[in-house]
Image: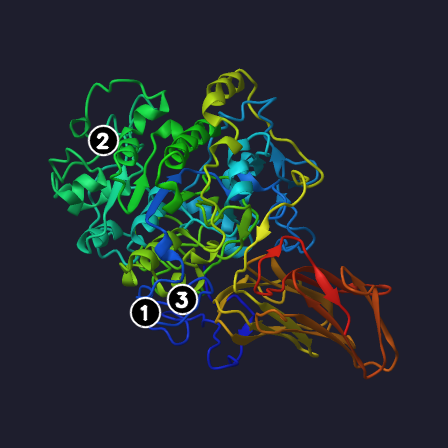
Amino acid sequence: MSEDNSRFRRRTVLGGMAAAAAAAAGSQLAGMGAGQAAPSTGSSGGSSGSSGGSSKRPNGLDKIEHVVILMQENRSFDHYFGTMNGIAGFNDPAAVRLPSGAKSVLYQPDGSAPSGSLLPWHVDTTKVNGQGLEGLDHTWATGHQAWNGGHWDSWIAAKGERTMAYFTEADVPFYRALAKKFTICDHYFCSVLSSTSPNRLYHWTGNIDAAGTYGGPAWENPPDYSFGLSWKTYPELLLEKGVSWQVFADNYIGDGSPDTRGDYGDNPLWLFRQYGQAAGTPLANQANVVNATNSTNTGNGTDWWLQNPPSDGSNIPDVLTQFTAAVKGKTLPKVSWIVAPAAYTDHPSWAPANGAAYLQTVLNTIWESGYWKSTVVFVNYDENDGFYDHVVSPTPPPLTPGEFLTTAGGVAGPFSQNYPIGLGVRVPMLVISPWTAGGNVSSQVFDHTSVLQFLEQWTGVHAGDSISAWRRSICGDLTSVFRFDHADTSNPAASFPDAIATRNALVSADLKLPTAATIYNTSLPAPDGPATLTALPTSYQPAASISVGPHQISWRLDNRGSWDLPVQAYTYHGEGAVPQHLTLRAHGSAALDVPSAGDYDVAVHAPNMFKVAARGRTDDTVHVEAKASEIGAAAALTLTVGNTGTEPATVLVSGGPVDRLVVAPGGRGSLRLGGGRYNLELSLPGRDDWHRHYVGLVETGPVDQTGKVAADRV
């Protein structure tokens, strides 16, 4: 990806704490050197401070005594949750548009579709074999092909038509029930635009060794159990500091047959030389790197595994004996990672019903024990397989330290040097604990390093520069999803559908059905019922304004929130060749110039469904300025409409407190939005070529109900 084909120009950064990262080799966020961190300061976040987290726990974390982490496999967020209402799903009003500007990225270009576009299509598990839905290519090359510099328009070309397949609540009832009962994160991204192992390496270590110093860069899946890597892992840091931990996995088979036993090669600690050389020591035993007597072995060495398993693993408790024994024996460590056998990972073509039953077994074990009142369970997915998600992942500014491959690393073709490692595609994350009950959604940006950052905050054991400064600045530490003054320690098991009892019947019946075939829809999927989730505060408060001159348009970008904000800027009339990826500092502002002569059509996007889009002509006399106040009880977004013409201007308003504003020549009129979500459009009568679209959330501090809008005219 060349860096000289854009016509965007970044101007002087406004404000001492604000920065849009420069598009030059070695560029950094202002005020942070390479290897320095911008850790969270608790639920409100932040972007300044020393490396690795705070020595003081955010309020409430001392109530947590145990953390259990289950990373499953290969499903995108939209694939499982796109039709859930009250989240950033298929009805997202802030979706990025395709390069043509005509439609959103939910209408993926497809030459085989009658309309030329393929929309998300339903895999109805009552009619087709959805439980056995096959997977797709999920390599580095096709991941970056689908990303396409941020245009997000090449999913069919990269992955095929099955990429747009999705499930509804009726197809994955247990997962939807968990989201409604606890907390779902709808801006949680995998870490790498690639496959399983790179993402699991980020989850356990914070990086893939981009510089190639310690056996990396691990941009694709290395051979399972190969001991070729050597950088420091987070479990080693916990061991050094005396924090108890354990990887729980089935020690039979490895990645073999039957697929209901073993660990599917999903424990990435098997990839590290220091674990192979530590056979029989606490390091190897706690990592479940067992019987590894030869650290030079590669592949799936059968001598490493216990032989002759006592059962085939079809009874799920048989493969969770280590974890169950620890819970019942009251020896559960502070930090537990659970690694499932292949058939229980959700990896296509293994059934979601199997994964749901496995997860329910894990949760029931905790819920029915004395550990529940003091335990948090994180359930996430390592990557998206090849399944589509519509939210364009945050991307670092070009050549951000630690975020681009600095050696070829064996990557063939055009997707090698100078292409970003991530963030990857959005994937599900559920946070299950007494302090995340109630049915909540968090729209703060997280990735797999967020789990490590949470552990940093909770244990005080810091990962340091294993996590890049850029990731620390935009990916939260997950402390913001907890409401420690709203604990519900009651056993919730009875409130959930019985995934364990129904999985065999579901899978057996589904396998008899025909293979799912592409459905060419003409409209987007409808949500599954009303919105019921409560939106948690994100500490974001962005605003964007455009001023129009005879030869250029200028963006003013403001971030009145307390967390750094990844911003994407798009043009649709040739004003710039590629999307621009910026990082806007907390409490900061920046300016961005776009050359234009005549017509313009531009948009900026940020997390939590934020969008400002503007189209018109450079000789227009009606202009709009947007200004956001600081986060607080009286927070608001104020839109000021100015008229520099000689005649009164009527501005039509959709989604606002009034349906029109009449602005006198040389005058100004205002709209004030406060206290919730907004989706506001401005237009001029008889002018299809002039339009403004504002989508976002005014953070008022207290928890807002998703969809609540409070607006009034000033």
The CA span between labels 2 and 1 is: 38 Å
Regarding residue 208, the answer to whether it shows in the image is yes
Question: Height in image: 462 above or below 548?
Answer: above
Regarding residue 388, the answer to whether it shows in the image is no
Residue for badge 2? 300
Question: Height in image: 605 above or below 115?
Answer: below
The CA span between labels 3 and 1 is: 15 Å
Residue for badge 1? 36
Marks 2,1: beta carbons within 8 A: no
Q: Earlier in the sequence, mark 2 or mark 1?
A: 1
Q: Position of residue 711 (x, y in %)?
A: 73, 65
Q: Earlier in the sequence, mark 3 or mark 1?
A: 1
Q: Dot 3: within a 10 Å radius of its alpha carbon, few (fewer than 14), some, or many (20 or more) residues?
A: many
Residue for badge 3? 41
Residue located 83% across and 80% down the image:
645
* Quadrant showing the N terminus: bottom left
In the drawing, does residue 409 fall left or right of residue 87?
A: left
In the drawing, does residue 11 fall left or right of residue 635?
A: left
Marks 3,2: beta carbons within 8 A: no
- Numbered label attached to residue 97: none
